[in-house]
Amino acid sequence: MEFIIKGRNVELFDDIKQYAEKKIKSRIEKFFERIIKIEVEFSAEKNRRINKDSKVEVTVFTPGAVIRATGYGVDFFEAVDNVNSKMERQIKRYKNKMIQKSRKPSDLNFVKESTKPDDGNLKNIVKVKRFEIKPMTPEEATLQMELLGHDFYVFINAETGKTAVVYKRKDKDYGIIEPQNKA
Protein backbone atom coordinates (compact mmCIF):
# COMPACT_ATOMS: atom_id res chain seq x y z
CA MET A 1 0.00 0.00 0.00
CA GLU A 2 1.21 3.46 -0.92
CA PHE A 3 0.96 6.29 1.66
CA ILE A 4 1.52 9.81 0.29
CA ILE A 5 1.65 13.03 2.32
CA LYS A 6 1.47 16.34 0.44
CA GLY A 7 1.46 19.95 1.52
CA ARG A 8 -0.18 22.65 -0.55
CA ASN A 9 1.31 26.08 0.24
CA VAL A 10 2.47 24.84 3.66
CA GLU A 11 5.71 23.47 5.04
CA LEU A 12 5.22 20.14 6.77
CA PHE A 13 7.43 19.17 9.69
CA ASP A 14 8.32 15.62 10.61
CA ASP A 15 6.17 15.61 13.76
CA ILE A 16 2.93 16.30 11.85
CA LYS A 17 3.89 13.77 9.14
CA GLN A 18 4.52 11.08 11.76
CA TYR A 19 1.29 11.99 13.59
CA ALA A 20 -0.71 11.76 10.35
CA GLU A 21 0.83 8.42 9.42
CA LYS A 22 0.25 7.02 12.91
CA LYS A 23 -3.35 8.24 13.22
CA ILE A 24 -4.64 7.90 9.67
CA LYS A 25 -2.74 5.00 8.14
CA SER A 26 -2.92 2.69 11.14
CA ARG A 27 -6.63 3.39 11.79
CA ILE A 28 -7.66 2.92 8.15
CA GLU A 29 -5.65 -0.31 7.82
CA LYS A 30 -7.34 -1.57 10.98
CA PHE A 31 -10.82 -1.18 9.46
CA PHE A 32 -10.16 -1.94 5.82
CA GLU A 33 -7.46 -4.19 4.39
CA ARG A 34 -8.05 -3.80 0.64
CA ILE A 35 -6.37 -0.40 0.17
CA ILE A 36 -4.32 0.52 -2.88
CA LYS A 37 -3.23 4.01 -1.88
CA ILE A 38 -3.84 6.70 0.76
CA GLU A 39 -3.20 10.36 -0.04
CA VAL A 40 -3.12 12.98 2.72
CA GLU A 41 -3.03 16.63 1.67
CA PHE A 42 -2.40 19.49 4.10
CA SER A 43 -3.32 23.08 3.28
CA ALA A 44 -4.01 26.33 5.10
CA GLU A 45 -6.82 28.81 4.41
CA LYS A 46 -5.69 32.40 3.90
CA ASN A 47 -8.73 34.07 5.51
CA ARG A 48 -8.09 35.58 8.95
CA ARG A 49 -11.82 35.46 9.76
CA ILE A 50 -11.71 31.67 9.72
CA ASN A 51 -10.66 30.27 13.09
CA LYS A 52 -10.17 26.70 11.90
CA ASP A 53 -7.85 27.45 9.00
CA SER A 54 -5.87 24.18 8.89
CA LYS A 55 -7.30 21.70 6.39
CA VAL A 56 -6.48 18.02 5.90
CA GLU A 57 -7.99 16.03 3.04
CA VAL A 58 -7.62 12.24 2.99
CA THR A 59 -8.33 10.17 -0.11
CA VAL A 60 -8.38 6.37 0.11
CA PHE A 61 -8.21 4.39 -3.11
CA THR A 62 -9.70 0.88 -2.95
CA PRO A 63 -10.38 -1.61 -5.76
CA GLY A 64 -14.08 -0.69 -5.78
CA ALA A 65 -14.28 2.95 -4.69
CA VAL A 66 -12.51 6.17 -3.82
CA ILE A 67 -13.33 7.43 -0.33
CA ARG A 68 -12.58 11.06 0.57
CA ALA A 69 -12.97 13.08 3.76
CA THR A 70 -11.93 16.59 4.77
CA GLY A 71 -11.24 17.85 8.28
CA TYR A 72 -10.56 21.32 9.64
CA GLY A 73 -8.93 22.50 12.85
CA VAL A 74 -7.10 25.35 14.55
CA ASP A 75 -3.90 23.41 13.85
CA PHE A 76 -2.99 20.40 11.73
CA PHE A 77 -3.13 18.01 14.70
CA GLU A 78 -6.77 18.86 15.36
CA ALA A 79 -7.56 18.67 11.63
CA VAL A 80 -5.99 15.17 11.45
CA ASP A 81 -8.15 14.03 14.37
CA ASN A 82 -11.30 15.45 12.76
CA VAL A 83 -10.65 13.92 9.34
CA ASN A 84 -9.71 10.61 10.95
CA SER A 85 -13.11 10.24 12.65
CA LYS A 86 -14.93 11.20 9.42
CA MET A 87 -12.89 8.73 7.40
CA GLU A 88 -13.59 5.92 9.89
CA ARG A 89 -17.35 6.51 9.57
CA GLN A 90 -17.17 6.52 5.77
CA ILE A 91 -15.06 3.35 5.62
CA LYS A 92 -17.43 1.57 8.01
CA ARG A 93 -20.39 2.65 5.87
CA TYR A 94 -18.65 1.48 2.68
CA LYS A 95 -17.66 -1.81 4.30
CA ASN A 96 -21.25 -2.42 5.43
CA LYS A 97 -22.50 -1.76 1.88
CA MET A 98 -20.01 -4.26 0.52
CA ILE A 99 -21.09 -6.85 3.10
CA GLN A 100 -24.76 -6.30 2.20
CA LYS A 101 -23.96 -6.73 -1.52
CA SER A 102 -22.10 -9.99 -0.96
CA ARG A 103 -24.85 -11.68 1.07
CA LYS A 104 -26.88 -14.24 -0.76
CA PRO A 105 -30.61 -13.43 -0.69
CA SER A 106 -33.18 -16.08 0.07
CA ASP A 107 -34.97 -17.57 -2.92
CA LEU A 108 -38.30 -17.13 -1.14
CA ASN A 109 -38.16 -13.34 -0.74
CA PHE A 110 -38.67 -11.42 -3.96
CA VAL A 111 -40.51 -8.45 -5.45
CA LYS A 112 -41.71 -8.39 -9.03
CA GLU A 113 -40.31 -5.45 -10.95
CA SER A 114 -42.91 -5.77 -13.68
CA THR A 115 -46.57 -6.81 -13.71
CA LYS A 116 -45.99 -9.06 -16.71
CA PRO A 117 -45.71 -12.67 -15.53
CA ASP A 118 -43.37 -13.65 -18.40
CA ASP A 119 -40.93 -10.79 -17.82
CA GLY A 120 -38.73 -12.62 -15.31
CA ASN A 121 -37.21 -9.43 -13.83
CA LEU A 122 -37.17 -10.11 -10.11
CA LYS A 123 -35.57 -8.06 -7.35
CA ASN A 124 -34.71 -9.85 -4.13
CA ILE A 125 -35.53 -8.53 -0.69
CA VAL A 126 -32.38 -9.23 1.27
CA LYS A 127 -33.26 -7.55 4.57
CA VAL A 128 -36.38 -6.80 6.55
CA LYS A 129 -36.11 -4.17 9.26
CA ARG A 130 -38.86 -3.53 11.80
CA PHE A 131 -38.93 -0.56 14.10
CA GLU A 132 -41.35 1.46 16.19
CA ILE A 133 -42.61 4.62 14.49
CA LYS A 134 -43.07 7.55 16.86
CA PRO A 135 -45.05 10.76 16.33
CA MET A 136 -42.75 13.75 15.82
CA THR A 137 -42.48 16.96 13.87
CA PRO A 138 -40.72 16.99 10.48
CA GLU A 139 -37.88 19.00 12.08
CA GLU A 140 -37.36 16.30 14.73
CA ALA A 141 -37.43 13.62 12.01
CA THR A 142 -34.81 15.54 10.02
CA LEU A 143 -32.60 15.74 13.09
CA GLN A 144 -33.00 11.99 13.74
CA MET A 145 -32.14 11.25 10.10
CA GLU A 146 -28.96 13.35 10.33
CA LEU A 147 -27.94 11.76 13.63
CA LEU A 148 -28.30 8.30 12.09
CA GLY A 149 -26.48 9.33 8.93
CA HIS A 150 -29.32 8.12 6.69
CA ASP A 151 -30.73 9.66 3.50
CA PHE A 152 -34.35 9.21 4.65
CA TYR A 153 -36.36 8.66 7.83
CA VAL A 154 -39.87 7.20 8.32
CA PHE A 155 -42.01 8.76 11.07
CA ILE A 156 -45.58 9.67 12.04
CA ASN A 157 -46.10 13.36 11.43
CA ALA A 158 -47.39 14.78 14.74
CA GLU A 159 -49.06 17.64 12.84
CA THR A 160 -51.09 15.46 10.44
CA GLY A 161 -51.14 12.06 12.20
CA LYS A 162 -50.06 10.34 8.96
CA THR A 163 -47.02 8.20 8.26
CA ALA A 164 -44.45 10.26 6.37
CA VAL A 165 -40.91 10.06 5.02
CA VAL A 166 -38.41 12.89 5.27
CA TYR A 167 -35.51 12.64 2.82
CA LYS A 168 -32.33 14.46 1.81
CA ARG A 169 -32.49 16.00 -1.65
CA LYS A 170 -29.57 16.32 -4.08
CA ASP A 171 -29.55 20.10 -3.54
CA LYS A 172 -28.83 19.44 0.19
CA ASP A 173 -32.35 20.52 1.23
CA TYR A 174 -34.99 18.18 2.64
CA GLY A 175 -38.28 16.84 1.30
CA ILE A 176 -41.29 15.11 2.84
CA ILE A 177 -43.40 12.36 1.31
CA GLU A 178 -46.90 11.94 2.75
CA PRO A 179 -49.86 9.88 1.57
CA GLN A 180 -52.81 11.74 0.12
CA ASN A 181 -56.36 10.51 0.61
CA LYS A 182 -58.59 10.38 -2.48
CA ALA A 183 -61.39 12.89 -2.35
Image: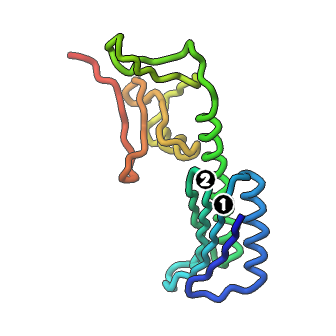
Q: How many marks?
A: 2
Residue at 58%, 45% in the rendered image: 147
Q: Amino acid at mark 1?
A: Ile
Q: Badge 2: how crowded within 10 Å, few (<14), some, or many (20+)?
A: few
Q: Which residue is mark 1?
A: 36
Q: Amino acid at mark 2?
A: Pro
Residue in front for this viewpoint, 167 or 98: 98
Residue at 53%, 22% in the rendered image: 125
Mark 2 and 1 residues: CB-CB less than 8 Å, in contact?
Answer: yes
Give the percent coordinates (x, y) of residue 44: 57, 82
Q: Earlier in the sequence, mark 2 or mark 1?
A: 1
Looking at the rendered image, the quarter that the N terminus falls into is bottom right
Q: What kind of element bears circle 2?
A: loop
Residue in front for this viewpoint, 161 or 7: 7
- Tell me which corner region of the image, top left, top right, bottom left or bottom right, holds residue 71: bottom right
- Tell me which corner region of the image, top left, top right, bottom left or bottom right, holds residue 20: bottom right
Give the percent coordinates (x, y) of residue 177: 36, 32
Residue at 62%, 34% in the rendered image: 102
In the rendered view, tell whether residue 3 sits above or below residue 136: below
In this picture the colour scheme is rainbow
Q: Which mark is residue 72?
A: none
Left or right of 169? Residue 108 is right
Left or right of 18? Residue 45 is left
Q: What kind of element bears circle 1?
A: loop
Residue at 73%, 86% in the rendered image: 13
In the rendered view, tell whether residue 84 sits above or below residue 47: above
Residue in front for this viewpoint, 162 or 15: 15
Looking at the rendered image, the quarter that the C terminus falls into is top left
Left or right of 48? Residue 12 is right
Q: Which residue is mark 2?
A: 63
Give the percent coordinates (x, y) of residue 32: 71, 52
Give the percent coordinates (x, y) of residue 52: 58, 76
